[in-house]
Amino acid sequence: MEKYKQMKMEHWSGHDKYYVMLNGEGRAVRGARMGYQAYLDFKKVKDALMIMSKNDDNYSYDGNTYSRVITASKASQILMKISECKWDEDIITVAKQIGADRMLSPIK
């Protein structure tokens, strides 16, 4: 974590931001995995959140149609938190729904 304190967030990679989001604020997030494969699945969750943030209807992602598990407003709030490297528990809810299993830890 020390290297991130010395570098501006605008210079961090997406994987770096994921790492800080999971380990920032002095505690590790429960229910999510670290590592690059987990990060790739996190990117899928972020894409699904972008789609969900546009309206309150069912949504299609990766060829599948899903019933909404969060509102468009909540999806927008989560995306804002992600941009600030802050975690939201509903990230796990969306990951479970779209099958982004590589980012899910068996702990939760």
Image (cartoon, helix red, strand yellow):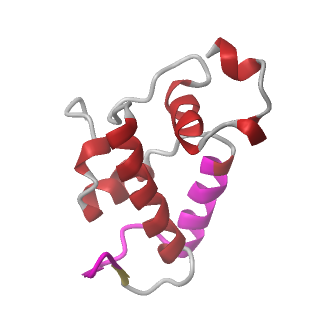
- Residue at the farthest left position: 106
Viewer-proximal residue among 106 and 19: 19
Residue extent of the magenta highlight: 61-82
Residue 77: image quadrant is bottom right
Q: Position of residue 69 (x, y in %)?
A: 36, 68
At horizontal 78% and vertical 18% (from top left) the residue drawn is 6
Task: Write down the quadrant of residue 96 in the picture.
Answer: bottom left
Q: Position of residue 74 (x, y in %)?
A: 55, 64
In the depicted structure, whether residue 72 falls above or below residue 11 = below
Quadrant where the C terminus sits is top left
Say left or right for 49 vs 8. left
How many numbered marks have been drawn onto this rendered protein structure? 0
- In this image, 99 relative to 84: left or right? left
Q: Position of residue 12 (x, y in %)?
A: 67, 36
Please report the residue visible at 41 percent of the width from the left and 50 percent of the height from the top: 42
Q: Is residue 74 magenta?
A: yes
Occupied quadrant, residue 57: bottom left
